[in-house]
Amino acid sequence: MRILTVLLCVATVLASRPAGAAPPCDARKVAAAARACGELLRGEGRFARDGDAMRRARRVALASDRLAREWTAAEAAAVDATCAAFSASGVDTADRLAAAVADAGASLPGSARCRGAVLGTLAPLCRRVVRSELPLLGDAPGAHDDRQLVLARVRTSLGRALPRTECGGGGPGAADVEPVLLRVAAGALGDATVRSLRALVADAGPEIGVAIEPNEVASDPVYAAALDREATSITAENVMKWGPIHPAPGTWVFGPADEVVARAESQGQRVRGHTLVWGALQLPAYVENASDADTLRAMMAEHIATVAGRYAGRIAQWDVVNEPLPGSLDPPTADGLDDNVFRRLIGPGYVAEALHLARAADPAAKLYVNENGIEVPGPRQDRFFALVQDLLAAGAPLDGVGFQAHLGLIPIGQYPDEATIAASLRRFADLGLSVELTELDVALVFRVGDLPSRLAFQGGYYRSVIAACATVPDCAGVTTWGLSDRHTWLRSFFGFTDWPLPFDDDWRRKPAYFGMRAALLEAALRGD
Ligand code: G3I
């Protein structure tokens, strides 16, 4: 019976799919993931009741094998490379799904019998939620509304179906269980559909950005294709910094920056300008050695007017000042600000002055100050918060704050959880500012364990970081600092062997990529 249901479902989608649309491959994967979702939840439910770990393990293995077989068949039948290129093999997905289901079971309150009954209740509902994605695959008109309709029905049946006897009349209610259901369903969908990150945020959700070196994109067609498929926002990793763009008085090197802006515009992608004033790195000697405040002020005014003026109206956001605090490994300073030439000659007011200059040069751009290590509460976040409050109190034209989010590195080996990051984002958003994760990568070099287990951790962690932004209304975007591990600054700048980004060196999607998708789908299912 179940097979018939799934096949009918796939047939329905195929019938509704406009001619020449995407192959049925992802539809078949979604249908298979829906069944696996139901099977694993029911199996976990039985395990919760009778504790038979052997039976549970056997059920997980069965689901893994079946999912791998069905997905391999779907990818083999795909009429174009899209789906077949997807490397989320069925086995990985089933393992991740089984882990999500086990977490779901563990997170439910009540006796084993109660938990078992609730999980059994979730099985058919999870199938329905996952299958609600099928009409969306063909971008059928009104599909998004249909999904919300399905969810409304699921919520109603959830409220009715929650067991009372096993839970003794108390136990978890729909409000406790619905997030668990959506989390499991989003995880299944995150692996099953081949829609890109860009497609997932098309109608809602944060911007998904990538920092690039234009020459790396131009020289690698696979990179260029992935960037255009996945990103809605582009940041210049280096070519807009003072040194590369204004290496000497009167010398301007705009070519690479022009290329970044023009390419992004041709792809309908937003541009984040990075960065007009940074006292620490890639600052030319003629600026570093400025003789006095007036000279430096004149340099800064000319630099900002020329660079921000050149791209006026084309930059969505400027990181006007980068890292006004001391580097997280630098010695503290008396006033808690970075001891750079701007601070020394002009004073702490250089940040506000730079913001005013940027506003004059490009009134359309949102103006940000960008910092690392402020994702966690503590003295560093407090100092930055005080700086931001001072800027707002002084009437500086500050629109937003960039949280760089070099996680696992700054602070070393620390991975603040979703609630911590969301609370940090909200703290600054509550000042009336936009917030963004502007340089996300998740370093593994300081984490113990074999690489597969570290990559699995990274996948779940990327999901929690994206979810933190997705749950904060004023979190407008998440930009990863590169897209493939092969380009990460951690290797070139520190010489680390690290794997911090969503794609691996050979452009295969890592668990990190699927974690991002699951978080975006969960936000979409919740209707964020
Ligand atoms: O372009 C020159 C090249 O001509 C020269 O041969 C080579 C060897 O010296 O250096 C090249 O410049 C390097 C540049 O990256 C481009 O690869 C600089 O030395 C190197 O210092 C620079 O590192 C960048 C670093 O910022 C300093 O600007 C990293 O790629 C970049 O990822 C990193 O990004 C920063 C953000 O801007 C701000 N937040 C922190 C983040 C990480 O440090």
Image (tube, helix red, strand yellow):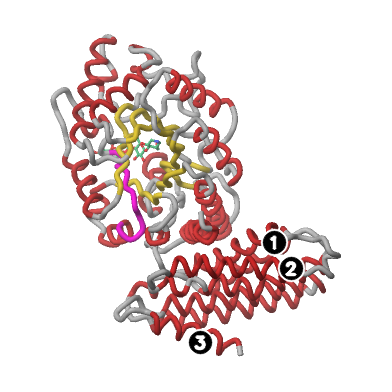
The answer as to whether callout 3 falls within 8 Å of ligand 1 is no
Q: Which amino acid does label 2 sit on?
A: Leu
Above or below, 133 relative to 20: above
Crowd band around label 1 with a 10 angstrom C-alpha radius: few (<14), some (14–19), many (20+): some
- Residue drawn at x 46%, y 66% as measured from the top left: 145
Q: Is mark 1 on a helix, strand or loop?
A: helix
Based on the picture, tell me whether residue 113 belongs to the magenta stretch.
no
- Report the residue marked by disc 1: 174
- Report the residue marked by disc 2: 162
- Report the residue marked by disc 3: 7
Q: Which of marks 2 and 3 is in front?
A: 2
Crowd band around label 3 with a 10 angstrom C-alpha radius: few (<14), some (14–19), many (20+): some
Q: Which of marks 3 and 1 is in front?
A: 1
For ligand 1, the image quadrant comes to: top left
Q: What residue type is labelled 1?
A: Ala
First of labels 2, 1 by sequence position: 2
Q: In which quarter of the image is the N terminus?
A: bottom right
Crowd band around label 2 with a 10 angstrom C-alpha radius: few (<14), some (14–19), many (20+): many
Q: Is mark 3 on a helix, strand or loop?
A: helix
